[in-house]
Amino acid sequence: MSAATPAVPAPTVIGVPAPQEDVDAIVAFVAGVQHAQQNALPDAFLAGFREDAVWTTAHGKRLTGLPEISAFTRTVLPPQADSPVTATYAVDLVLFIRPDVAAVKIRQRPVSRAGGAYLDEIFHGQEDPAALMAAHPEAVPGTPTYVLAKDDGVWRIAAAQNTQVLDVATLTAG
């Protein structure tokens, strides 16, 4: 299943100069992460990591190295195929730290597999979404940051932090 994703603006690109083909490759990389997540494909997801990567989950669990990331992913990702909720991933910002290293800010939105409705829209315009957040934790969006390294012409995750959006102003603004 691939949730319908409306056209998203091109990401903001800052930092050292980098060719557009690298920006395009990073956007395509994140689209691949989305595909792997939406379709619960551990091998496709894991192919995007360096062997020495560090990953911190949205709930704060640190995973170090591909074997540890793999063991976790192979446990938690396959059951997601039956979940009524998946997520879309859109690149918001790319900071080229060096031509071969980029910090990538992603907007991760929960979406219904049936119909493709964005679940986080229930928070938009709410003055105090705390009760809604408690009642609908599946609707809380994420804001991952990936540090990608380009090795042998291929972008891969060197380090990543997946964070839930709990900031009220960010959550309610949409």
Image: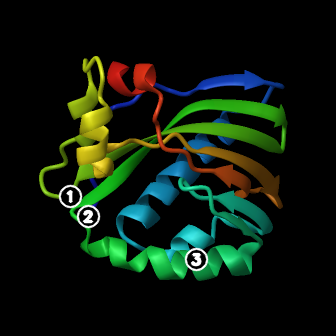
The reply to whether the C-beta atoms of the residues labelled 3 and 2 are less than 8 Å apart is: no
Which numbered disc covers residue 1?
2
Does label 1 or label 3 sit earlier along the sequence?
A: 3
Does label 3 or label 2 sit earlier along the sequence?
A: 2
User: In the displayed structure, would residue 82 be above or below residue 129?
Assistant: below
User: In the displayed structure, would residue 58 be above or below residue 39?
Assistant: above
User: In the displayed structure, would residue 60 be above or below residue 165?
Assistant: below
Q: Residue at x 73, y 30 (%)?
A: 95
Secondary structure beneath label 3: helix
| Residue 155 in the image, given as x and y percentages of width and height | 71, 54
Which numbered disc covers residue 10?
none
Does label 2 or label 1 sit earlier along the sequence?
A: 2
Which quadrant would the N terminus be assigned to in this image? bottom left
The amino acid sitting under disc 2 is Met
* Residue 24 or residue 113, whichever sits in front: 113
Q: Horizontal placement of 135 versus 8: left or right?
A: left
The residue identified by callout 3 is 72
The residue identified by callout 1 is 113
Q: What separation in Å lies between label 2 and label 1 (alpha carbons)? A: 7 Å
* Residue 43 or residue 82, whichever sits in front: 82
